[in-house]
Each structure stands twice: as structure tokens, then as C-alpha cells.
């Protein structure tokens, strides 16, 4: 039984490709959908700052801290709005914004919440593309120890020869389970 679904997002259109699936599952299963956004703390480029100019170094550190604070606030606002919208539609939703390694924090949060499923988007790369670029989704699948639903967004899936989507899914933008395109599990 799926009671809690963790949905990692980063604010990108690609990451949001999982939202129709998470919404459908959350609604049908009466499961809580919990969004997470992980950000990495910006570290100042101290090599650009002259090592003998303490003011330049302090300024670089301050600038990086301000940038991180802005990113954290933007992520929090983004997820809060998403939670409000989903709750207005009757879906139990929550969110978390954390700092750190995306793979580690996604898995750590999933276990802390007792999530039964992690649902996330993927570029759908295989072979050399995945090997070269690495993939948070791939690492989560290998390390999470709980089921992971990987979704290749509809726009990309429709370009793939093996994707299957019904006209109703394409027209509405919100596929139902029976009309989901091919999923990578």
C-alpha cells in the first residue's frame, strides 16, 4: 500500500513532468504527496579573490551566502505554492527544502518520512549518455531501497519510438493510470 509519495523537484520543466503522475497516484490512492527540493550551498570562488585582500574574500563569502539564501527562499515559495494548489484540489501534500547532496537528501528524506514510493522525472538517457552525465535518478534507484517511479516527461516520451500515449492523455496533459506512456521502472 502506498501511503506517502516523495516527489523531488528542482523547479525545472523536466522535473515537473512527474507532477501529473504524482497527482493521479496521490488522488487515487489517497496518499500524501511530499515534495522536496535539494539545493547545494554556493561556495565562493576564493581563487578569483586576491588572497591578500581580505575584503574581497569576505565580500565573496557574503555574496555566496546571499545567493544561497535567495535560492532557498525561492524553493520554499515554489513548493509552498504547489502544496497550496494541491491541497485545494483535496490532495494531502507537504514539502521540504534541504541543503546537501541531491541523491543523499532525497533518500534520507524518503526514509525519514516513511515514503512508500519516490516519483521523479528523468531525462531517459541510457548507455554512454547516462555514464558520462551521471544521474540523480539512477543513483536514487540504485540506493533508495524503496520503489522508485521514473517518468520521462510526455514531451520527450512522445518523441521516443517506444512511448505510448492515448489522445486523452495528450489532450488533457493529465494522464490517468490506464493511459500513461511507457514508464521506466
Image (cartoon, rainbow, N blue to C red):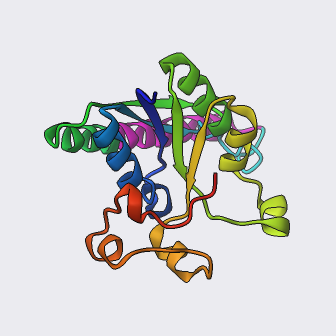
Q: Is residue 101 above or below residue 47?
A: above
**What range of the chain is rendered magenta?**
52-77
Q: Is residue 107 above or below residue 24?
A: above
Residue at far left of view: 88
Point 65% across, 41% down: residue: 44
Q: Position of residue 139 (x, y in %)?
A: 73, 43
Q: Position of residue 83 (x, y in %)?
A: 27, 38
In the image: residue 50, left or right of residue 183: right
In the image: residue 88, left or right of residue 177: left
Point 35% across, 31% down: residue: 31
Quadrant of the rendered structure where residue 163 is?
bottom right
Q: Nearer the viewer, residue 18 or 2?
A: 2
- Residue 54 inside the magenta-drawn segment: yes
Q: Position of residue 154 (x, y in %)?
A: 46, 70
State how many labels appear.
0
Q: Is residue 156 above or below residue 37?
A: below
Q: Main secondary structure of the magenta part?
A: helix
- Residue 31 inside the magenta-drawn segment: no
Residue at far front of view: 178
Point 62% across, 82% down: residue: 161
In the image: residue 31, left or right of residue 180: left
Point 33% across, 49% down: residue: 24
Q: Nearer the viewer, residue 108 or 98?
A: 108
Amino acid at each position: 500500500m502506498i501511503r506517502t509519495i516523495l516527489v523531488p523537484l528542482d523547479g525545472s520543466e523536466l522535473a515537473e513532468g512527474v507532477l501529473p503522475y504524482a497527482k493521479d497516484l496521490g488522488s487515487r490512492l489517497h496518499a500524501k504527496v511530499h515534495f522536496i527540493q535539494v539545493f547545494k550551498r554556493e561556495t565562493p570562488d576564493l581563487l578569483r579573490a586576491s588572497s591578500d585582500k581580505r575584503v574581497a574574500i569576505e565580500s565573496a563569502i557574503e555574496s555566496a551566502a546571499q545567493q544561497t539564501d535567495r535560492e532557498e527562499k525561492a524553493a520554499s515559495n515554489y513548493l509552498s505554492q504547489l502544496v497550496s494548489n494541491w491541497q485545494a484540489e483535496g490532495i494531502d501534500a507537504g514539502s521540504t527544502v534541504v541543503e546537501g547532496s541531491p541523491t543523499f537528501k532525497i533518500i534520507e528524506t524518503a526514509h525519514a518520512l516513511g515514503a512508500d514510493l519516490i516519483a521523479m522525472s528523468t531525462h531517459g538517457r541510457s548507455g554512454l549518455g547516462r555514464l558520462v552525465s551521471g544521474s540523480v535518478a539512477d543513483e536514487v534507484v540504485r540506493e533508495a531501497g524503496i520503489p522508485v517511479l521514473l517518468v520521462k516527461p510526455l514531451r520527450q516520451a512522445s518523441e521516443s519510438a517506444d512511448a505510448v500515449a492515448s489522445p486523452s492523455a495528450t489532450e488533457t496533459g493529465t494522464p490517468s493510470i490506464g493511459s500513461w506512456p511507457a514508464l521506466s521502472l
